Image: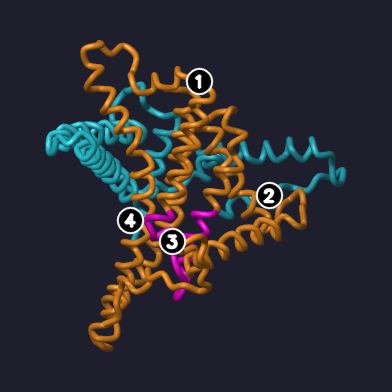
Chain colours: A cyan, B orange
Amino acid sequence: MNDDQSELPSEPPDPQGPGSLDDLGARLKQARQDQDTKTGRSISDKVRAPASGFGQAFRIGTELVAALIIGVGAGYLLDQWLETTPWMMVIFFFLGAAAGILNVYRAAAQMGLAGNNSQTAPTGNTVGDAGQDNNGDRP
Amino acid sequence: MANPLHQFEITTIAPIKLGGIDASFTNAGLFMVLTVITVSLFLGLSMRRKSLVPGRWQSMAELSYEFVASMVRDNVGNEGRKYFPFVFSLFMFILFGNLIGLIPYSFTFTSHIIVTFSMAIVVFLGVTIIGIVRHKLHFFSLFLPTGVPMVMAPVLIPIEILSYLSRPVSLSIRLFANMMAGHTMMKVFAGFIIPLGIIGGWAPLAVDVALTGFEFLVAFLQAYVFTILTCLYLNDAIHLH
């Protein structure tokens, strides 16, 4: 994380003394661009969080389970209310399972794992890429 | 062997009764207060000397700001700017809560589902209200994707509604389960170190060292996941995918 900081002092000092803010901004931008072309990554990529395979797997799992919990819970409450035990719970179990699979599909699409789909979020690919980059860092 | 779940016990520090409701100040509350103080001190002190070329502390504060700002910008767009303070507070609160929980003998409030669920429900209700205020009744088109034959609507609408309602649940379960599982695992392995003695104790100790590193990753990752999902939900409510 300190990479950004270390690049600043390496900038050669301005011979005309401390310049204006615009000057410094321009030099910072230049330094960042040099860094990008050198490493092939942008600063914002480096700042991205590591999304580990473990994290992705866990996310998929909870998406599925959460929708099932909500489905069965809604079915149970409807049964209590309409006194139709156990039919609402049976129906909502399957609806909850469907919603869970829909959630999983959407989560996978966001991670860029589900092929070409309109659901793909703007960050989808970067999150997936970061995951692959950082898999080796995990103990 | 020490009980590995002992660390999650809530102990009352100052008993308070509010109209029959037990609103005591507990260790969970204490660590939430500590987290808020730490975040405020971290951001306040590191930005006290505002230099153009940031030092170490200022760089860390700026990095966390930039991190969340670019997350909001990338996922929500310019309309998300005004929700940045909330998203940033959420991120810093969860991150510091997770990190402070890693200090031995401290308490991890994010390992309690009621804490994570109340944060998730605030996000969920807030996002829903923002969506309804912005789009009025048109907001409910979120539950019926365009181009779907009307025959499918009676099945699809309940599925979409259940999927929408499951958001706060999955959001809270993910954070709570990650924190609780990691901390329990660490304590279980730690409980084996002394009983196995000087010969066999090294194996669980090595596992615990690895787990400690892993827990730091999880602490950061879960704060990130919670925040980025908040951004994605906010994006859904603002742009109606």
Q: What element carries label 4?
A: helix
Q: Which of marks 4 and 1 is nearer the N terminus?
A: 1
Foreground mark, 2 or 4?
4
At label 3, which amino acid type do we have?
Phe
What is the spatial separation of the Cα atoms under label 2 and label 3, in whole angstroms? Answer: 28 Å
Would you name the residue on which mark 2 appears? Answer: A8
Looking at the rendered structure, the kind of residue marked 1 is: His
Callout 4 and callout 1 share a chain:
yes
Asked where in the image residue A38 lies, by quadrant, the reply is: top right
Q: Is residue A48 above or below residue A108?
A: below
- Dominant secondary structure of the magenta stretch? helix
Query: Residue tagged by mark 1?
Result: B135
Look at mark 4 in the image and give the residue it sits on. Answer: B177
- Say what amino acid the circle numbered 2 marks: Leu
Residue at image point 40% right, 33% down: A124
- Asked if badges 4 and 3 are on one and the same chain, I answer yes
Q: Where is residue B30 in the image (x, y as percent from the top left)?
A: 53, 67
Q: Where is residue B137 in the image (x, y as percent from the top left)?
A: 45, 19
Q: Which residue lies furthest to the right in this view?
A: A16
Segment colored magenta: B93-115
The span from disc 1 to disc 2 (Cα, nearest Å) is 46 Å
**Residue nearer the viewer, A23 or B63:** B63
- Look at the picture and state if B59 lies above or below B104: above
Residue type for callout 4: Ala
Judge from the rendering whether residue A109 lies leftward or rightward of residue B23; answer left or right. left
Q: In which quarter of the image is the C terminus of chain B?
A: top left
